[in-house]
Image (tube, rainbow, N blue to C red):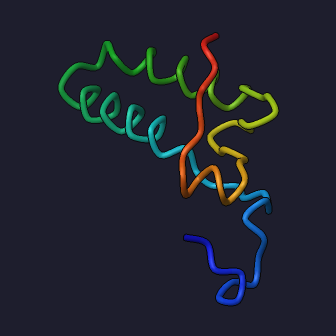
Amino acid sequence: MFRPDLSDASPSAHVCVPNLALLGVLELLHARAATSPAVQPLIDVVVGVLAGWRDEHVDGLFVRRTAEELIWGYEVGVV
């Protein structure tokens, strides 16, 4: 439960955080590239796409959401 008296910020404040799920995928690909050099071009493509990805909630490898969405969750639209 949100307690306004214990917080300096509003739950509707926007927060910018690293997109940990995507960074995890990149880490798995990087580990795989150590044993299979053919994977490195795939990593380069994925990083390039992610770095250029922009919408109302995503800025490259970062995600912008409200504090409330990050704490309690949110629905992701199907693209």
Q: Would residue 42 be found to the left or right of residue 75 on screen?
A: left
User: In the image, residue 21 lies at what x, y percent?
Assistant: 44, 38
Residue at left 54%, top 53%? Answer: 72
Residue at left 78%, top 57%? Answer: 14
- Residue 60 found in image quarter: top right
**Outermost bottom residue:** 5
User: In the image, residue 67 lies at what x, y percent?
Assistant: 67, 60
User: In the image, residue 69 lies at what x, y percent?
Assistant: 63, 50
**Outermost left residue:** 35
Q: Quadrant of the N terminus?
A: bottom right
Residue at left 63%, top 24%? Answer: 48
Q: Would residue 11 be found to the left or right of residue 2 on screen?
A: right
Residue at left 78%, top 29%? Answer: 54
Q: Would residue 52 be found to the left or right of residue 29 on screen?
A: right
Q: Would residue 29 be found to the left or right of residue 4 on screen?
A: left
User: In the image, residue 22 lies at what x, y percent?
Assistant: 48, 35
- Location of residue 64 with respect to 52 vertically, above or below: below
